Image (cartoon, coloured by chain):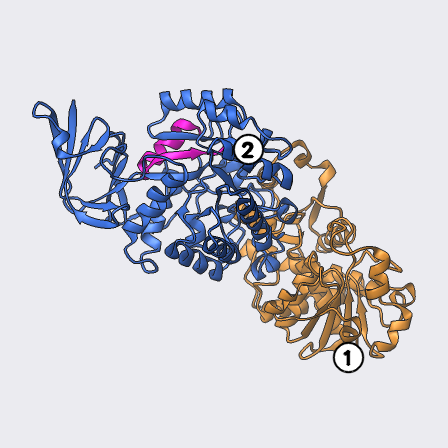
Amino acid sequence: MKSLLIKNAFVVDPRQQTCSRRDIFVHEGKFADEKQIGKKDQVEVLSLEGKYLLPGLIDLRCHAKNVLGGSEENIKSVSETAAQSGFTSLLLMPDISPIADNPGAIRYINECAEKYAVVKIKPAGALTNRLEGQALAPLGSLREAGVSAVTDCPLSAQNNQIFIKGVEYASMFNLPVIEFPRDHSLSSDGNAHDSVVSLAMGLGGYPRMAEELFVQRSITASKNLHAHIHLSSISSKGSVELIEDAKNKGINVTADTTPHHLCLTDESIRGYNTHFKTLPPLREEEDRKALIKGLAKGTIDSICTAHQPHQDHLKNAEYDISPAGVTSLDTCLFACLSLLGEEIPNLPLKISEWLSYNPAQILNSESGTIDIGSPADFIIIDLETDWIYQASESPSMSSNNPFSGQRFNSVVEMTFVDGKLAFQKGP
Amino acid sequence: MTWGRKSLLGLEDLSPEEIICILDLAEEFKQFISSKKKSPKNLKGKRIVNLFLEPSTRTRVAFELAAKSLSADVISIASQSSSLTKGESLTDTAKNIQALGADAIVIRHSSAGSPLFLSRTVPVPIINAGDGSHEHPSQALLDIFTLREKLGSLKKKKITILGDILFSRVARSNLWGLQKLGAEVTLAGPATLVPQRFEELGARVTHDLEKSLSGADAIMLLRIQHERQSSSHFPSLDEYTRIFGLNAARSSLLKKDVVILHPGPINRGVEIDSSLADSENSVILQQVTNGIAVRMAILYLCAKTAEEQ
């Protein structure tokens, strides 16, 4: 059996909270101790002077349009985009075709992933049938078919009873529930954050309240049911405050936010560029600052990409007609590394916490670490490569990315999944 | 002349000089209209396409008359007859209109920002004739033109805009235009339709009708737009009329020579009583006539810039 020895890289270890030069052994697809490697084993040695080794990134919110084929983002294209961008696991949202609200769809996704995906695709099942919020999906059967979590993202069950029963029922299977907190009645024509920018532009508002009311609902549900709820794509300062307060009281909620909410504000939408029409919408500088602070303090646990591919002819339309959501898988790591360096000290270590270790904990997954015995999902990155990102050159089948034209200072050189090379950057 | 734009998308980006440039030329055109003579400034041989994707009578007719007064050829496309009802995108419709040789497109659309979107898609001059709740620059320019006729300079003049501000493109364009010419703008109406945040755009905001009326040099009334708001923004038209309607009893709060404007169409007995709409203070019909002269100026300036480019 062939083994791998990686020498001279700075190894970022989120569990030990260290970043140091040391050797890493991989044996039979797992991180290994030197002693586990037999004398007869063939050892390939990679010397990676000056590069960083991080656990592979895990995305808790990734949308694709089709499971297979078509001219839109599918499992193959999204997984190739992931590998090139440092992600080794994707939690695939259920709003895919076919919709992931039944065991057959989950088996189909898993079979296709097995055949065509170069990274780990973990399907999330729907919490309610057709994501309509009217009746619970067969959560137990979904669990048996192999879902890693349940969610109605990018929608949210509006009926409180359905939502609460869903959380209670899912907890029986120890199935993580991911809530995209959104009051539909307050965000129905939600083109933009409710601010002076949207007011001047004449755009309908998606106020902070639309999110915060439902964050509070999850906190109340979690407290009363003693069940874990993960809040997805938090965008408002008020939500951060609610979550901080809940965590201080020992309530079992976790939360994530997105790279665009960490790097951009609603000032970007002036000019009606639909590539900044995100879901939830970009908010104000005070929100952005609160999200960064929330991450630094541990109030927010992780970063998800909120990758939502849309076809160009649909996205490039009138602002209110254009669908909300942006692609982000291909820029998440680079945007965080390049744009947040001044605001967050010790960034590579933090990134591995927010994009690997914590998401793995939320999904009860063994990945997300470089612990001996855990799956050898890891990436090699270079932090001194200057390049300009162009959405049109992305392996994603969509180019609705808000960072097109942005200068980045880091690049993924190699991505390994279960010890096997899934991507290597060309010369 | 200080005009160098081929499109008019809104008043937010215009300088005071550019606004005055349009108003001055409109004044010139108005004299030709009153004397029933043709201006030597014309757009003979130019094709102007009116693409009206939302119902409109006043604005569409005024743009048609303006184009005809400039001797341009004008074609009007309404939403029912356009291929957008067959699922064609706005981009494709506009590219087809361009291919048909249009020299300018006047667009009315329910999506905010659609004229800007079009101006990035086709190289033809785009004139915004109302985009969602965003801007309606030609309406604001004719309002300002009418106010200038009545009040002279607008510097330090107190102008109150009353009614549904949140969903009003007329209010936004007037807010930009009036402030650029030095007027003090008060926005008034129910809290749900006049968010306090408008103060960040330079206006004074009040929900007290009396305060908004007393001392005002001009009152601009806006129609309550049933088609835009859900019932969630105010309880009923009756209640609106009771609390914010401009009726004869409240006219004692008004300055004697106050100017009353309304972009139309008027809901008589809702936002304004008939007696006031038809009073000497009302300039509602002058607004309509001035609308032709102002739109002539807009079309002429934009088409000429495009020609020079």
Q: Which residue is mark 1?
A: B215
User: Is residue A154 in view from this perspective?
Assistant: yes
* Of residues A288 and A162, the one drawn nearer to the viewer in this rendering: A162
Horizontal relation, residue A340 to residue A208: left or right: left
Split into 4 quadrants, where in the image is the C terminus of chain A? top left
The verdict on residue A78 being magenta is yes
State the orange chain: B
**For the residue marked with disc 1, what is the amino acid?**
Gly
Residue mark closest to the camera, 2 vs 1 = 2
In this rendering, the answer to whether A380 lies above or below B204 is above
Report helix, strand or loop for mark 2: helix
**Chain to which the residue tagged by mark 2 belongs:** A
How far is mark 2 from mark 1, CA to CA?
64 Å
Q: Which mark is residue A169?
A: 2
Q: Colour of chain A?
A: blue
Report helix, strand or loop for mark 1: loop
Split into 4 quadrants, where in the image is the N terminus of chain A? top left
Magenta-highlighted residues: A74-94
Residue B66 position by quadrant: bottom right
Residue A260 location, x and y as percent?
A: 44, 50
In contact (CB < 8 Å): disc 2 and disc 1: no
**For the residue marked with disc 2, what is the amino acid?**
Tyr
Disc 2: CA contacts within 10 A as few (<14), some (14-19) or many (>=20): some
